[in-house]
Image (cartoon, grey):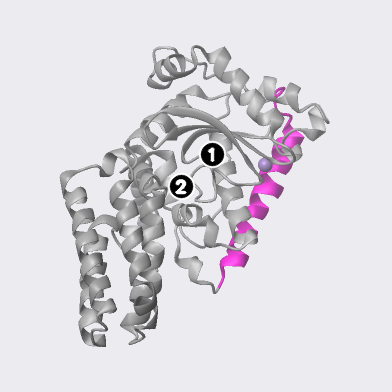
Amino acid sequence: MKNMKCYTILVLSILFTGFNSVLTAQNYPFKLPELPYGYDALEPAVDARTMEIHYSKHHAAYVNNLNVALKGTRQADYSLEELMLYAGELNDVIRNNAGGHYNHSMFWNVLSLNSPFNGQSEIGKAVNETFGSLDSLKRLLSKAGATRFGSGWAWLYVTTDKKLAVCSSPNQDNPIMDVSPERGIPVLGIDVWEHAYYLKYQNKRGDYLATILNTINWETVNRNYMEALASPLLKIIEKESWTALNIFHEVMAETFHPSEEGNLKPIRERSGELLAKARLLQSGTIPPSFDTPEIKKSIDDLVKGAIALNQMVVKKADDKTISKKLGDLHDTFHTIQGLCRH
Ligand code: MN
């Protein structure tokens, strides 16, 4: 009965939140998801032996290595989504295996021999509008995959301004990661590691790409696309890639947190820098979904507060006064930034 209840909740959550959010909401210890078909289901495009090794050895190893690497670390509390959003702070073992788990979980689901492209679907309309045709998109994905030196992935992804774009990434990185130069939510990922094709295609990555791009489950890609457009993750990525905010945040964190411990030296040395970063934030472009009157006012308040704080520091005010002012500034900052991660 208990299992039945869990199962019902799982099915309902997949129905209502979609594949990507269910996946990114996963927590340690991570589990190898079931392959949605048999090893031979994609023959002859993907041979059964490659599928078996790829899933039961490679993907299983990513999951296993990820759990081993996370054990006892602070990042064991992170969801898969957070592991990717903050990949820059992870060691290479965690970063590569977390990416490997996410990327392969998506990969199995976006492949099918019989789910053709439909120009009337939401993804179909967006592909035609953005790239002109499915063939143009295939050419871009094929080029992205073929020109990725060494191991990596080719991606179709939704950008933070809700457009479709193509990119490639090295190793097991993906566009959710803060280390990626192209940011957004992937809706279709193509594995171009040799382990994905070598048994059947040997060194001919181009032949593999041509075949795999005709083996796409467009129904799933359409669902991924609809979900990405509505996903709160897109807004998080948009905020995380707001460079001026990150720069201000860094100086704020490095001055405010020591002050909480009674160490005022950092803010006394860097109040001018904090003000300069606040002005940079004020004069820069605000990402579209944060461009509201409330946020603009918060940024103006931040500059005013930083001016006042800097004057206090110049006039050598006492620790308590400076601490109080810095605390207020930190509160103002968090009306923009949300919960502090430092
Ligand atoms: Mn792979």
Look at 51% across and 12% down and name the residue there. Answer: 133
Name the image quarter holding the C terminus: bottom left
Res 169 → quadrant = top right
Task: Say what amino acid the circle numbered 1 marks.
Answer: Met
Locate residue 102, reporting x and y percent: 54, 47
Q: Is residue 340 visible to the viewer in this orientation of the structure? A: no
Query: What's drawn in magenta, residue-wise?
Result: 43-71
Circle 1 — which element? helix
Q: Which mark is residue 23?
A: 2
Magenta: predominant secondary structure element? helix
Q: Is residue 94 visible to the viewer in this orientation of the structure? A: yes
Work out whether 305 lies above or below 209: below
* Contact check, label 2 and label 1, Cβ < 8 Å: yes
Work out whether 262 lies above or below 288: below
Locate residue 14, reporting x and y percent: 38, 41
Cα–Cα span, label 2 and label 1: 9 Å
